[in-house]
Image (cartoon, rainbow, N blue to C red):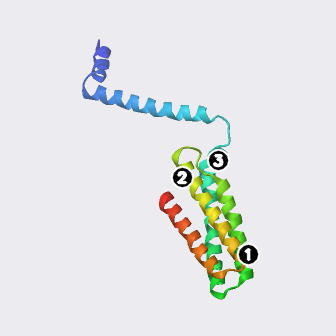
């Protein structure tokens, strides 16, 4: 009889509700952990997250762009056509790589990113065309346009 009274004390009133809430929260948390563990199975966790890897690749390209922009800016000041062509082609190769990167799997972000990267590649190809023609003045104007494409993309994705 004493034992029945003790059980009833914990199953009623605020101590019982506290214990019940603790059990519910603990079981819910354990269920989430178990569900995630089964969902991933034995796969390698790092390789399955393409958006993270894709974004890391895109961020690595940014250092290439920064370097190219600095060198192109210097070459425009000195009118060094060889350096302009070398850096312009390097920038074009990086822009093609960006266009193929596509770090976003679906939805509006993927479409917007693709649009920006295609425009960036198009303008960079125009820059290289003007450099190849030896037209420093138009190369400088196109370079400003390429820089604006970078800024407009960063305004959306930063």
Question: Residue 141: x and y, percent?
Answer: 58, 76
Q: Which-is-in-front pick, marks 1 and 2? A: 1
Name the foreground residue: 135 vs 103: 135
Look at 30% across and 27% down and name the residue there: 17
Image check: 153 left or right of 87?
A: left
Image quarter of the N terminus: top left
Label 2 or label 3, whichever comes before in sequence order: 3
Would you name the residue on which mark 1 appears? Answer: 132
Q: Position of residue 92 (x, y in %)?
A: 69, 66
C-alpha distance separating marks 2 and 3: 26 Å
Mark 2 element type? helix
Residue furthest to the top in view is: 1
Q: Are marks 3 and 1 in contact (CB under 8 Å)?
A: no
In this orientation, does residue 126 appear? yes
- Which residue carries the number 2 mark? 112
Q: State whether residue 132 is above or below residue 92.
A: below
Along the viewing direction, whichever of 90 and 25 lies nearer the viewer:
90
Q: Is residue 70 above or below residue 24?
A: below
Residue 112 percent across, percent down from the top left:
54, 52
User: Is residue 12 shown left or right of residue 140?
Assistant: left
Measure how far apart labels 1 and 2 are at the Cα level: 30 Å
Quadrant in the rendering for residue 129: bottom right
- Residue at (64% x, 34% y) in the render: 41
Considering every residue shown, the one lying at the far left of the view is 13
Q: Earlier in the sequence, mark 1 or mark 2?
A: 2
Badge number at residue 46: 3
């Amino acid at each position: 009889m004493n034992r029945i009274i003790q059980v009833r004390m914990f199953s009623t009133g605020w101590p019982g509700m506290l214990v019940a809430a603790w059990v519910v929260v603990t079981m819910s948390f354990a269920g989430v952990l178990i569900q995630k563990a089964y969902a991933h199975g034995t796969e390698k966790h790092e390789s399955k997250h393409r958006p993270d890897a894709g974004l890391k690749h895109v961020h690595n390209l940014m250092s290439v762009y920064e370097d190219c922009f600095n060198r192109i800016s210097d070459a425009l000041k000195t009118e060094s056509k060889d350096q302009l062509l070398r850096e312009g082609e390097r920038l074009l190769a990086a822009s093609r790589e960006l266009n193929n990167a596509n770090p976003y799997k679906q939805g509006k972000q993927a479409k917007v990113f693709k649009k920006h990267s295609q425009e960036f590649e198009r303008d960079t190809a125009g820059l290289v065309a003007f450099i190849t023609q030896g037209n420093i003045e138009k190369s400088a104007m196109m370079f400003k346009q390429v820089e604006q494409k970078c800024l407009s993309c960063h305004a959306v994705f930063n």
